[in-house]
Amino acid sequence: MAFVDELNLHLKAGHGGEGVVRWLHLKGKDLSGPAGGNGGRGGSVYAVAVRDLTALGNYVHEKKYKAGNGAAGGSNSKEGKNGDDFTISVPVGSIITNKETGEEFELLEENQKEMLLKGGTGGYGNEHFKGSRNTSPEQSTEGKPGEMANFYIELQLVVDAGFVGLPNAGKSSLLNALTGAHAKVGDYAFTTLNPNLGVLYGYTLADIPGLIEGASSGKGLGHTFLRHIKRTKMIIHCISYEESDPVKAYTTIRTELAQYSPVLAEKQELIVCTKSDILSEDERKEKRAALADAAGVPVKKIYDTSIYDDASLKTLGDMLTKALAGLA
């Protein structure tokens, strides 16, 4: 199933069934009183949150969905059958906006269910109108139409920490090494086109596709994936030792985060230098010192790691787990 993180849909609740005119037939008396039942209620439209990042992919090929209509009332005062509800499954973290009213629904917990549109009420049968002055009513009413609207659905991942960095910064490899995830890895930019998730001791980590200069204004993958780190508790900023100018790589991403949302710039940040196996300790020390000055943090707060160095991975994993526990 394809990963889809934004979608436009036209949704419609069901029409209420019509009330009917019917008569009670008793032996020896053809018209023994009104007995027309009310129409059934039209089905409503709901959204439910599921732990499936590909859930929106189910609705890509068809953009219009509707709930069932209520059935007409029956004789002998029988009420018509209610229309079937329609439920759309969306990933946890989805924001659903009614484009007609502006109303928003945030689905942040698994199995959270929200009514988006209400089905129409059923019409009244003639029995409803019986009274002391109207013993043989012949009127009935039609059912009411269900609500309908266009909706915009946007997914913003709900994760504990998000890996950010320029393309080919080693984010996917690091996620795989720390969590056993199976993100696609390659030696070229934009290998990752979809966010990848992994779990480290109960904490969910997300590999956000590589950002570039101008991402905040939509360049590269731009807004498509910047929104996925809005809800993270911590940013893990990955900078490859392959970069000739790691300070520029760092400031480029920091600028894009701040321009996209000031909130992102205020999130706790962990700076990780990846691919430490390709440089000597002296070379790494020089680059870490420059990064520390640019970031305004002690050199000891910048971590070296390599997917080929189990000790560095364990140190990083333990530190990250401890930091996330402090943010819980």
Image (tube, rainbow, N blue to C red):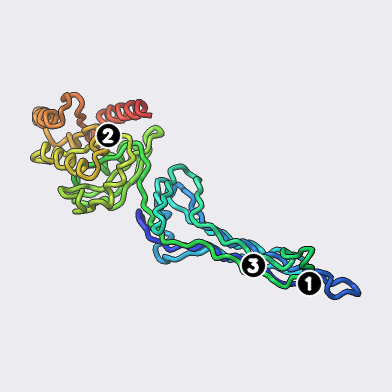
Label 1, label 2: how far apart the Cα atoms are: 70 Å
Quadrant position of residue 263: top left
Amino acid residing under circle 2: Lys
Residue 51: x %, y % from top left: 45, 46
Residue 1 visible in this rendered orientation of the protein:
no
Q: Residue at x 35, y 55 (%)?
A: 6
Q: Residue at x 14, y 39 (%)?
A: 251
Which residue is more in the foreground, 131 or 278?
131
Q: Is residue 64 left or right of residue 198?
A: right
Label 3, label 2: how far apart the Cα atoms are: 54 Å
Amino acid residing under circle 3: Ala
Amino acid residing under circle 1: Trp
CB contact under 8 Å: marks 1 and 2:
no
Give the foreground label among 1 and 2.
Answer: 1
Which residue bears the numbered disc 1? 23
Q: Is residue 191 left or right of residue 321?
A: left
